[in-house]
Image (cartoon, grey):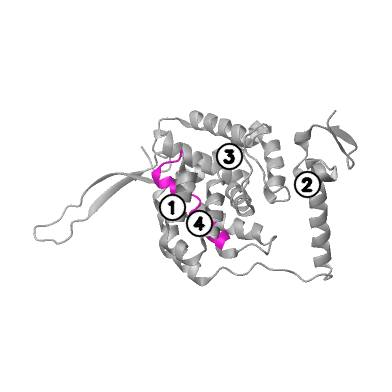
Amino acid sequence: MGHYCWKCGQYLANEKFSGKGHARHICKKCMAEERAHRRQLLKEKRERGEIPELKLKPVSQKVIDYVENEIIPRYAAFDKAHQESHVRMVIEQSIKLAEHTPAMNSDMVYIIATFHDLGLVNGRENHHKESRTILEADEFVKSHFTRKQIVTMGRAVEDHRASNQKKPRNGYGMIVAEADHFIEADTIIRRTIQYGLANYPKLDKAGHYQRTIEHLNEKYGPKGYLKIWIPWSDNARNLKKLHVLLADKKKLEDIFTVCLQIIWKTELVWVDAHPDITLPGDDYTGYHAMAFTAIMGKVAPEIGG
C-alpha cells in the first residue's frame, strides 16, 4: 500500500520518501517544495532588512595566487571545450552558487572548481577520478587544508561529472557539478562543436551537426542523463528553455551555424611549419607557419582554398 504523504495526500512507494521525510510523512517532492518555499521566505526577509545579509568570506589571496600561477595554466593543454575560459566560468558559477550558503568554505569552493578537470591530462574517460587524485596529492592543498577538508574536496571533484547518476556526496560536489553544467544554449552548442572538431576531425558539416543534435538530446533532452542537483539554480530554469529549443529544429540549426561561423573565424589550427629563409651567419632560426581552419576538413571560405 505504500506510505502516506500528508502534504500531497497520496500513498506512495517507500522509495519516494527520504529518511527524514519518512519520519515526517512527507514525500521527497513535497520536501523539495517545502525547502524551496523556506528559501524564498528567507530571501524576502533579507530583502526587507528583517534579518542581516550573510556573505561568503572572500577567497584568500594565497589560494588565488597559487591557482593563477600553478593550476589555471595547465588548462591550456586541454581541448577547446576545457581550456581557461571553461575553468574560469566554473569558478565564477561556483562562487555565485556558494553565496547562497555562506557557511561554505570559500577557499574549498575555489580549489574544487579549479581542480575539477585537471584529470583530463590522462584522458577523458576517468578524468573525474584522476582529478581527485591530483587534488589530494597537491602539496599546496595538503599544506593549506585539513585532511578532512581534502577528503571532502576530493569527493566533490570526483562527483562532478555530468554522467554521474548518483547524487554528489556533499554540498561542495553539488555546487561544482551545477557550475560545470552552466546551461546556456550558445555556450553548450559551441563547446559541443569544439569537442567534435578535436575528436572527430573527419566529419563534414552535416556530420558535426548530427553529432551535436545527438549529444544535446542524450545529455540535455527531456530524457537526458544530466541531473540538476540544485533545483533553484539558473540551470534548472535554463534546462526547461533548452528543452523548448531542442524541439525547434530550425532555430537550433541557426544557432549551430552561427556558432560554427564564429569558430571558423576565430579558432585557427597551425598545420605546416618550415624554417624561415635566412642568410648565412644569421642567428635567427625561426619558423614560418601556414594556418587554416581544420573545421570539417576544409579551408575556411574567408581564408581561401
Q: Nearer the viewer, mark 4 or mark 2?
A: 2
Q: Against 206, is 37 above or below? A: below
Mark 4 and mark 1 in contact? Answer it, CB < 8 Å: no
Q: Amino acid at mark 1?
A: Ile
Residue underneath mark 1: 134
* Residue 97 percent across, percent down from the top left: 65, 57
Q: Is residue 47 above or below residue 136?
A: below
Q: Residue 86 placed where, x, y %?
A: 51, 52
**Crowding at mark 1 (Cα within 10 Å: few <14, some 14-19, many 20+):** some
Task: Check disc 4 and give the amino acid type.
Answer: Thr
Which residue carries the number 2 mark?
Answer: 20
Which label number is shown at residue 304?
none
- Is there CB contact under 8 Å for labels 4 and 2? no
- Determine the residue positioned at 75% across, 35% down: 15
- Label 4, secondary structure: give it: helix
> In the drawing, does residue 50 fall left or right of residue 65?
right
Give the CA separation, mark 2 to mark 1.
36 Å
Percent x, y for residue 207? 49, 28
According to the image, label 4 marks what residue? 114
Residue at the spot 41% in from the left edge and 53% down from the top edge: 76
**Residue carrying label 3:** 164
The range drawn in magenta is: 108-125
